[in-house]
Image (tube, grey):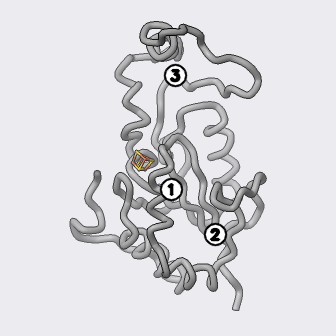
């Protein structure tokens, strides 16, 4: 049997969606027997590979690294799942958008690191990716194939999306238990 090549991606999110993925508990053993996990922060794999079948993408697009990453993920992945409310709407990650930085992220950086910090200093350097002026949900940047809401989506919802995919079917979430935000 050919195994599905599964990836999980962590962009602008708190990792709570990935923690919820671990709540799949013993079903993770079933999943592990049916997929190859080819990229994930859980597996410490550094390079996003070619030929990924399914990717769970947690988090919004908040900085230049996220932007580069999501283009690469879209280019190399057949089926992208917007994983959690931050990926779908921006949610918590996009709360900084109310500061109104339409032309520059300086107002956000000033507020976070200069106005309210006891040791004011804006982090800089090659390893610090540039903030985008506005946080965007994933589908605003690249096409998304499926939306998995929740903050975080609970394990039942995650399984409800992954199980049909393992059987070669399209997931179809319906009803408040599966599609409610928050
Ligand atoms: S949707 Fe909720 S749990 Fe998931 S990354 Fe965003 S804030 Fe964290």
> Which residue: 64% across, 54% down?
74
In the displayed structure, 147 sits above or below 160; it is: above
Task: Residue 144: give its label.
Answer: 1
Instruction: Using the image as rendered, state which of residue 32 and residue 103 is in the foreground.
Output: 32
- Tell me the SS state at disc 3: strand
- Marks 3 and 2: which is nearer the front? 2
* Residue highlighted by disc 2: 6
Answer with mark 2 or mark 1, whichever residue precedes in sequence.
Answer: 2
3D distance between C-alphas at marks 3 and 2: 31 Å
In the displayed structure, 159 sits above or below 94; it is: below
Q: Which quarter of the figure has residue 93? A: top left
- Tell me the SS state at disc 2: strand
3D distance between C-alphas at marks 2 and 1: 16 Å
> Which residue: 53% across, 33% down?
62
- Tell me the SS state at disc 1: loop
**x and y, in percent, of residue 150 in the image:** 34, 56
> Which residue: 69% across, 66% down?
52
Disc 2 and disc 1 in contact, CB within 8 angstroms: no
**x and y, in percent, of residue 152 in the image:** 38, 55
> Which residue: 64% across, 55% down?
41
Number of residues whose C-alpha sits closer than 10 Å to that of mark 1, classed few (under 14), some (14–19) or many (20 or more): some
Number of residue marks: 3
* Residue highlighted by disc 3: 133
Instruction: Using the image as rendered, state which of residue 35 and residue 23 is in the foreground.
Output: 23
In the displayed structure, 154 sits above or below 61; it is: below
């Amino acid at each position: 049997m050919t195994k599905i090549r599964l990836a999980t991606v962590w962009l602008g999110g708190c990792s709570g969606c990935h923690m919820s993925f671990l709540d799949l508990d013993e079903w993770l053993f079933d999943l592990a027997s049916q997929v190859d996990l080819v990229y994930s922060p859980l597996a410490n794999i550094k390079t996003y590979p070619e030929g990924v079948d399914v990717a769970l993408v947690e988090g919004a697009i908040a900085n230049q690294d996220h932007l580069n990453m999501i283009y690469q993920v879209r280019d190399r992945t057949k089926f992208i799942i917007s994983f959690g409310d931050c990926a779908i709407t921006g949610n918590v990650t996009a709360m900084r958008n109310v500061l109104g930085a339409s032309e520059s992220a300086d107002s956000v950086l000033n507020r976070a690191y200069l106005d309210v910090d006891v040791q004011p200093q804006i982090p800089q350097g090659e390893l610090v990716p540039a903030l985008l002026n506005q946080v965007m949900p994933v589908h605003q940047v690249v096409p998304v194939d499926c939306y998995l809401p929740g903050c975080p989506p609970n394990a039942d919802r995650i399984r409800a999306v992954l199980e049909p995919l393992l059987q070669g079917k399209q997931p179809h979430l319906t009803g408040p238990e599966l599609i409610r935000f928050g």
